Amino acid sequence: MVVIDGIRDRDGLLEKLGINAYNVDTKAHIWIIDHDICLQCEKQQCINCCPAACYEPQPDGRVIFSYEGCVECGTCRIVCDEFDNIGWTYPRGGFGIQYRYG
């Protein structure tokens, strides 16, 4: 396993995502609606299912989300079906991910 900037690079994910370009907006296009609801979720599938590893568990059981590296796939919205605790809107024009090489 490779470590990039102190972060474990699972299956070369960070290297692959580094090919893409991001125009990060100051306004999040996706967010956790209520962090306390994450405490009720036993599965916390968002952590394991996000292909960009944007969800991170905290010691207190809450989950934090960093939208800056989001690949806008929608996986988290699908797996959070029990609590429907993910808010989403289209990124503003010109912002978000720009895929390189397909």
Image (cartoon, rainbow, N blue to C red):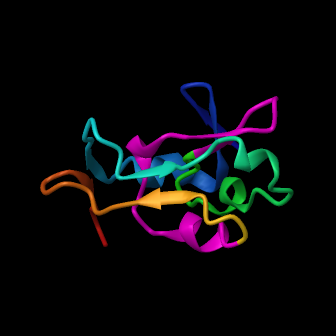
Left or right of 66: which side holds 93?
left
Eyeballing the image, is 2 above or below 32? above
Question: Which residue appears at 31% of the width and 73% of the height?
Answer: 102
Q: Which residues are magenta?
A: 55-81
- For residue 76: magenta? yes
Eyeballing the image, is 98 above or below 31? below
Q: In the orientation shown, which residue stands out farthest toward the right?
A: 42
Where does residue 98 sit, x and y in percent of width and height? 24, 58
Question: Which residue appears at 71% of the width and 58% of the height?
Answer: 48
Where does residue 17 sit, x and y in percent of width and height? 43, 52
Left or right of 81: which side holds 44?
right
Total count of labels:
0
Quadrant containing the N terminus in the rendered view = top right
In this view, the residue in front, 34 or 54, is: 34
Kindly indicate the quadrant of the structure image that contains residue 23.
top left
- For residue 69: magenta? yes
Where does residue 77 sit, x and y in percent of width and height? 55, 68
Q: In the orientation shown, which residue stands out farthest toward the left?
A: 94
Where does residue 35 sit, x and y in percent of width and height? 65, 42
Question: Which residue appears at 65% of the width and 66% of the height?
Answer: 80
Question: Which residue appears at 54% of the width and 58% of the height?
Answer: 86
